[in-house]
Amino acid sequence: MEWYRDTDFWLTFSSVLFDNQRWVNAPLEAQRAAELLQMKPGDRLLDACCGVGRHSVEFAARGLRVTGVDQMGLYLEAAEETAEAEGVEVEFVKDDMLAFRREEWFDGAVNMFISVGYFDDPEDDIKVFRNIRDSLKPGGGFLVDTVGKEILMEQFRSKEWYRTDGNFVISRYRAEENYGRLWNRWILYDQAGRHEYTFSHRVFSADELTEALKKAGFSSVTVFGDLDGSPYGPQAQRLVAVGLR
């Protein structure tokens, strides 16, 4: 079974992936993503690989009609609880982005928090991008927020450790395929004990992500160094690409 389909992995590391600081960051990230896509209240937005819905809920709070899609049913249950607690309406759909598609339905789409490059076959990334492209109305934009290969090469560390929300995490990394893939070994110590998982994912350069989006049918792609719209250069914090249908 592919690692990204392993329910145990996502449940075990949910407290690390969605720690308190990431919830604190979500409102500003959603605001900036909506601004880059030039979304306005009433527009339909697809949140692809929405996870526990921290961005979906923030988009909805800004007046967007949001559909969040994820393969993890338990994440979606948590997302629905958050939406209800915040008093916003979000449509959450359990589906695989390799399959999900609504022809010309959305005004914009996002894929945030390094949720691309999981597949062994690069053509599967193209298929997901194409499904999203076909789900957009003409002129609609798709925002991808990930880590760029250029940033990874500049800041690469083979190991790190940190505490988050009372848990202790040790991570080891190995760059593979000329920094085209990143191998990860995560070890978590929490109240339940010790948990260890290994996995790898593809890392895109700005040019590679642009090429992949254009191959999927996007007419133009603009690249930024953060969600604030800053240039993609030496000071970039993220790789943010916006493709237009």
Image (spheres, rainbow, N blue to C red):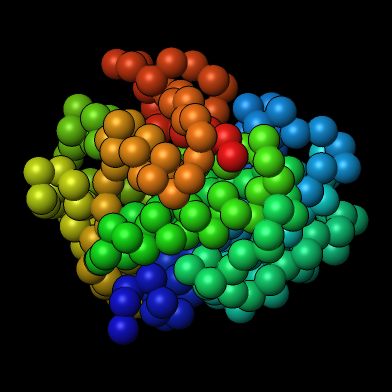
Front residue of 210 and 27: 210
Q: Whole-percent x and y of residue 119? A: 32, 64
Q: Residue at x 31, y 83 (%)?
A: 1
Q: Whole-percent x and y of residue 167? A: 41, 60
Front residue of 205 and 245: 245
Residue 240 higher or lower than 67, as above or below: above
Left or right position of 125 against 234: right
Residue 128 higher or lower than 227, as above or below: below
Residue 185 higher or lower than 44, as above or below: below
Front residue of 41 and 222: 222
Give the residue at the far bottom of this rendering: 1
Q: Residue at x 64, y 55 (%)?
A: 135
Residue 12 higher or lower than 110, as above or below: below
Q: Whole-percent x and y of residue 202? A: 27, 53
Q: Residue at x 38, y 35 (%)?
A: 210
Left or right position of 196 against 235: left
Judge whether residue 58 can be spotted in this image: no
Q: Residue at x 63, y 42 (%)?
A: 26
